[in-house]
Amino acid sequence: YTTGRFMELDMDARRNLELTETLRSKEKKGTLLWVLDKTHTAMGGRMIRSWLEKPLLDPVEIGRRQKAVEELVNSTISRGELVEALKDVTDLERVMTRIVTGTVNCRDLLGLARGLRALPEVKKQLLSLDANLLQRLGNEIDPLTDCADLIEATIVDEPPLTVREGGIIRKGANADADYLRDIMEGGSGTIAAIEASEKEKTGIRTLKVGFNRVFGYYIEVSKSFMDQVPGHYIRKQTLANCERYITQELKELENQVLTAKDRLTALEYQIFQNLREYLAEQAARVQQTAAAVAAADALCSLATVAVQRGYCRPEITLGSEITIENGRHPVVEVMLKDALFVPNDTRLGASDNLVA
């Protein structure tokens, strides 16, 4: 906010003009914002509210906005495609705030990724238009593909609400997490590796590594290969056709199984924290993009209302006169249900209207 760039409106002026809430009921309906706000993103809604509360003073800047709105009014197809793209953009600003403050969860991140996927189309549509402001907004949008890719590669499709109970990291995102998850699910990969290794070392082709709830992990050797059992094998159980043994390696694996869940939960939370910290470092990129998307949405909103209500583009001058032909009060006109609004001409500041 820069003093002199915007018209300064105190609270009484804002209240009496009913820019964002009505005097009587404090509702949005019946205000100028209610008439003009046809935005499709939460960011755009906040932006158009800000524009109403802080009107521009510089005719050049006003002209840039008008030129952008005029092109959107005249480019029906492009405006429609831009609006459709905007509908898929989630509230980047709010999620970024949660990321930076450390209150974000996995579902928030997936929502962020989903919103980021819409950015390339928004950028494409803006750059297809000619107005300087629309071109600038298109150039300011960063598709943030790296952030979307990282989120989608890390977080499962349907994560739990809490981030501290595990089950949030996608398989393949982290080798250590995959190892612990394999152990928790029965350790099939680990068991197969140990079994292959022991077969190679002992030459016992019928050797098997198994697991049960009573004895935990064990090595099973048929009676016909008893003479090839290594000395470091510890006999655990004797069956009719085989013997079962344990080794130090299997004891360690068993201990890993017993602690795998807690270790995996802690590791998944750390992976999530690392992801959150990376995204927090991208805050400036996201904020710039969010501001550009919000402005594009607000401009589309103004263009949509202009088309629906038949508004024209006013000419802004540096003179002291205000001339309005067939002027209509935007709110009263919309609020009238069964009556036709009668437009009025207004002329202020002309020499023949001045009083000495």
Image (tube, rainbow, N blue to C red):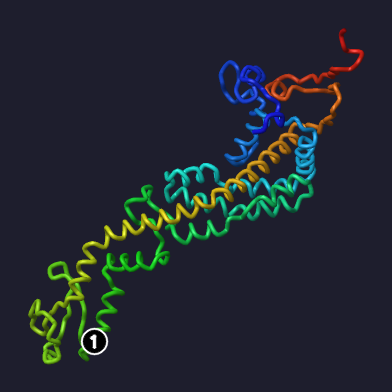
Q: Which of 141 and 70 is in front in this view?
A: 141
Total marks shown come to 1
Depth check: give the residue in front, 25 or 183.
Answer: 183
Look at the picture and state if 24 lies above or below 117. above
Disc 1 marks a residue whose amino acid type is: Lys
Who's the residue at 45% across and 43% down the image? Answer: 101
- Rendered position, 338 above or below 108: above
Q: Which residue is drawn at 14% across and 87% down?
A: 230
Left or right: 215, with 280 as reference point: left
In the depicted view, which residue is nearer to us: 279 or 332? 279
* Image location of residue 317, percent across then percent down: 85, 29
In this picture, residue 222 sits left or right of residue 292: left
Q: In this picture, is 325 found above or below 98?
A: above
Instruction: Indicate the quadrant containing the C terminus: top left, top right, bottom left or bottom right.
Output: top right
Residue for badge 1: 199
Quadrant where the image shows the N terminus: top right
Image spot of residue 183 (x, y percent): 28, 68
| Picture residue at 91% right of the left edge, 15% below the top | 351
